[in-house]
Image (cartoon, helix red, strand yellow):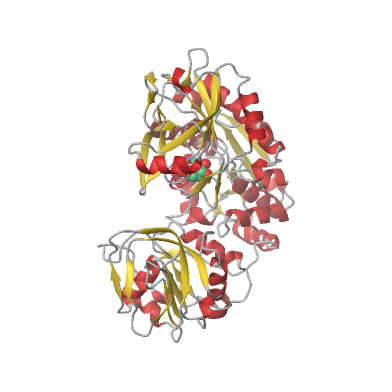
Amino acid sequence: MLDAGGQYCHLIARKVRDLGVYAEVRASETPARELAGARGVIISGGPASVYDPGSPTVDAALFSLGLPVLGICYGQQLMAHALGGQVRRGEKGEYGMAALELDDSSDPLFAGLAGSQQIWMSHFDVVAAAPPGFHVTGRTSTCAIAAMADPNRALYGVQFHPEVVHTTRGKQYLSNFVFRVCGCTEDWDPRHRVPILEREIREAAGSRNVFFFVSGGVDSSVAFALCTRALGPERVRGVYVDTGLMRQGETDWVSRIPGLTVEHAEDRFLGALAGVTDPEQKRHIIGEEFVRVQERIVESRSLLDEHWILGQGTIYPDTIESGGTAKASLIKTHHNRVAGIQALIAAGRIVEPLKSFYKDEVREVGAELGLPAELLERHPFPGPGLAIRCLCSPVNAPVRQTPEGWLIPVKSVGVQGDERSYAPVIAIDSLDHDRAIEIVNRVRGVNRVVAPVETRVPVAHMQVWASELSAARIARLRRADAAVRALSHQSGYDRQVWQFPVILIPLGTAESPDSIVLRPIDSVDGMTARSVPMDPALRSAICAAVLEDPKIAGVFFDLTHKPPGTIEWE
Ligand code: XMP
């Protein structure tokens, strides 16, 4: 899988693995000779134009290795550009659903399929002329070369995205490429791998012991359990740092894991965060504090001596520069920056048993280890914890009526056109996702739309209050989060969503200065996300529980997808 900068690159690799075939992500420029051992190559989409200076390229020799190649979106354009076709700069983009008409029903990529197929497009440039040797295999009403092929050289291109769910038969196209064109066989199964992983851990550790920083999340817990099983509990140690920014019950829960000790650092973190309102500053302070605590632990326990190596729960997307979330890698950088840990890494004294696995595969390994579903099904929880879900304001500010709804001057982070935005929110009067999409696309300077579910007073009577990241507000958020989590678990709703942040915003009245925002989303990898509707009974139960706290003025529902709104508000 060659990464040409597309946000869907990992998704494609994962879909191939889901078919039972091992796939690895490499930089698009990887020299062709390094790819010679592969059965086939897929070039991902990406936001660039082949004409942009410095845009991702591939080694042209790739096309003469005799290896099957599938170019997707920008990948198809790169292929056309490299092989003598023509790419035209689009005047306007094409985004969304389209109907693919197949021209060549004998094409192996579309084998077993006929007629019109729903596909999903997201592109600006198009292939205007297929390269010599290619013929068109599919078109849409607006895209004359939606698919092209040169079966003699096993080269295939598609302008649309087979990896996304909106391309109804996408799995079939990928399966056709992998099995029919490349001739792969099913040989990848993330399950039943525990004995192999144990052997790898024993080889990496030799006679040394393994030390972990465990977060309580799925990855580090599974890696820790694997090492414990491979080496025996007496040779594996873990520390969990309680930052005071964790969810209710988290520290108790984690401290039940055998071999783990808890390092209490609540006062240090909350002290350092006092008075802070800016989201980037919050992250920076937390990162720095983490470095200090880790440094102290590494030194005080003599972990630098030759008897210890470091275990980490790094998973596949974390190992790729462009993978995971930018912020997740930021947190990892903080951890890795600790001088003692850097020294261990530099000396190769590190074991990362999960580094070729995706999240869902890690869950399967965990199940094979017999870890409880309660642990494996945990939603992702960000390293900086509740701090990025507790919004602050430097000043008091009124809400303002606009033609779209109430403009609430609480700024939250969003991602618009690949740029980070930091903008206020609009509250509309109904839980209408379509209207929310329309507003956020049309109204400049806004990146989110919420709707009240239940409030003590109308939004018109609320204001934004000057507020900081205090222990009292974190505690308020922690209680609300625990209540929401319990109810969404009881109702089974937590299994319908990928993550469910609960946010505290400083919007309310003098007596009840804060409000809660519910942000349930569905996602594959956190890179994009959709706000998920909730049934009225659960909404009412949540409001009743949250509004038991007299300091909370109302419960709102975040209707925004990502993009333009990020998952976390920060
Ligand atoms: P955003 O807010 O960027 O979040 O849409 C995408 C995913 O990343 C998680 N996230 C983090 N995870 N450390 C982490 O380990 C962080 O600093 C961090 N920030 C965001 C977020 O919860 C979501 O799953």
Q: Residue at x 60, y 21 (%)?
A: 547
Q: Nearer the viewer, residue 71 or 454?
A: 454
Residue 174, percent from left and from top: 54, 70
> Residue 54 falls in which quadrant of the image?
bottom left
Q: Is residue 566 visible?
A: no
> As drawn, is 194 to the left or to the right of 87?
right
Residue 69 coordinates in the image, percent (x, y)? 45, 76
Q: Is residue 412 above or below residue 25?
A: above
Return the residue found at the far top: 511
Image quadrant holding the C terminus, namely: top left
**Place of residue 497 in the rendered image (x, y in percent of width and height, measured from the top left):** 60, 45
Question: In the picture, residue 280 is in which quadrant?
Answer: top left
Residue 494 in the figure: left or right of residue 51: right
Residue 100 x/y as whole percent: 47, 69
Looking at the image, residue 321 lies above or below residue 88 = above
- Residue 503 against residue 298 in the figure, above or below: above
Viewer-closest of 102 and 557: 102
Q: Nearer the viewer, residue 416 or 141?
A: 141
